Image (spheres, grey):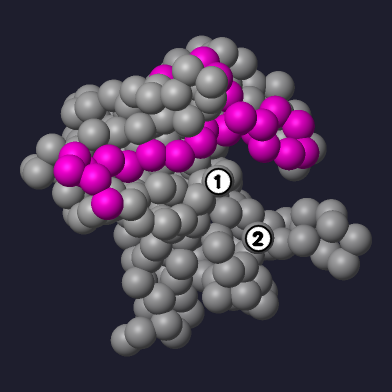
């Protein structure tokens, strides 16, 4: 099973709404964003609906009103705004009104993103060029991702391997080599991806497999967060 957005609590309303705070990752901690734009996209990248800000005293809190055809659907969520790169998620809309957990939807800050890749020693085409897509993945349970190989299939069918990392005991990210056995994966990245339709592939060495489809425009960061690797056959 794959889970992307966990619902904090369910609320009873006549309209079906999906709401919560929106954040940006600018330093080492998340900060709420009061000027973000949040939208739901189809799996083909078409904009389906925009979130509204129902509370003037908290503009970081945004709310989708879901039509019946958007309930329990696999969609993409995109956040954009000042000082962040457009950041895209895969998720499943709720069947009933729900509030997403604080910190589960956030955009990658421009300065943080470039500093992050520099710290890994990776040269990327800046998302500001809008020529490519970058992907950052964060498994929910890193230990469940031991010995998982990860790649991205681009629209032209070519595969790009993801670089995997784990934290050591001091909190430093260590690179995991191709085919290298590892007990956990804390972060993985795939850089300079061709915009358009793409598929994230994760394969465990015991044969388990999963894939997630995205459709991203140039300049976007795919936030492959909240990933749970199923242990069911």
> Which residue appears at 37% of the width and 65% of the height?
2
Look at the image and tell me whether residue 153 can be seen: no
Location of the C terminus (image quadrant)? bottom left
Mark sitting earlier along the chain (2/1): 1
Q: Which mark is residue 73?
A: none
Residue at 73%, 39% (x, y): give it. 29
Above or below: residue 184 compared with residue 216: below
Q: Quadrant of residue 117?
A: top right
Which quadrant is the N terminus positioned in? bottom left
**Residue 180 placement: quadrant:** bottom right
The percent coordinates of residue 230 (x first, y second) are: 40, 76
Query: Gap in Å between the C-alphas at discs 2 and 1?
Result: 21 Å
Foreground mark, 2 or 1? 1
Dot 2 falls on a residue whose secondary structure is loop
**Position of residue 215 in the picture relative to residue 192 (left or right):** left
Count of number-bearing discs:
2
Point out the stretch of residues depicted in magenta. Answer: 12-37
Image x and y of residue 18, in percent: 32, 42
Q: Is residue 19 magenta?
A: yes
The residue at 35%/56% (across/down) is: 10
Structural crowding at the residue carrying mark 1, measured as other residues with C-alpha within 10 Å and reported as few (<14), some (14–19) or many (≥20): some
Residue holding disc 1: 102
> Seen from this angle, which residue lies furthest left?
69
The picture places residue 70, in percent across and down from the top left corner, at 16, 43
Above or below, 122 against 158 in this view is above
* Residue pointed to by mark 2: 186
Residue at left 46%, top 75%?
A: 204
Looking at the image, is 27 positioned above or below residue 187? above
Instruction: Give how far across and how far down residue 71 sits, in percent.
Output: 17, 49
């Amino acid at each position: 099973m794959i889970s992307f957005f966990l619902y904090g609590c369910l609320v009873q309303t006549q309209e079906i709404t999906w709401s919560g705070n929106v954040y940006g990752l600018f330093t080492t901690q998340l900060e709420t964003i009061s000027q973000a734009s949040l939208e739901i996209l189809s799996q083909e990248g078409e904009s389906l609906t925009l979130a509204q800000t129902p509370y003037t005293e908290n503009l970081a809190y945004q709310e989708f009103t879901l039509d019946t055809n958007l309930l329990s659907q696999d969609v993409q969520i995109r956040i954009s705004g000042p000082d962040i790169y457009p950041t895209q998620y895969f998720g499943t809309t709720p069947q009933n009104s729900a509030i997403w957990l604080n910190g589960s939807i956030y955009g990658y800050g421009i300065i943080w993103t470039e500093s992050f890749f520099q710290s890994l020693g990776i040269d990327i085409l800046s998302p500001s060029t809008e020529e490519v897509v970058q992907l950052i993945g964060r498994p929910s349970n890193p230990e469940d991702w031991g010995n998982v190989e990860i790649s991205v299939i681009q629209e032209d069918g070519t595969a790009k391997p993801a670089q995997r990392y784990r934290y050591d005991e001091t909190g430093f990210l260590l690179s995991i080599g191709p085919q290298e056995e590892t007990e956990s994966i804390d972060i993985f990245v795939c850089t300079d991806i061709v915009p358009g339709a793409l598929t994230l592939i994760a394969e465990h060495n015991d044969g388990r497999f999963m894939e997630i489809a995205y459709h991203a425009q140039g300049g976007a960061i795919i936030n492959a967060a909240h990933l749970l690797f199923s242990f069911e056959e």
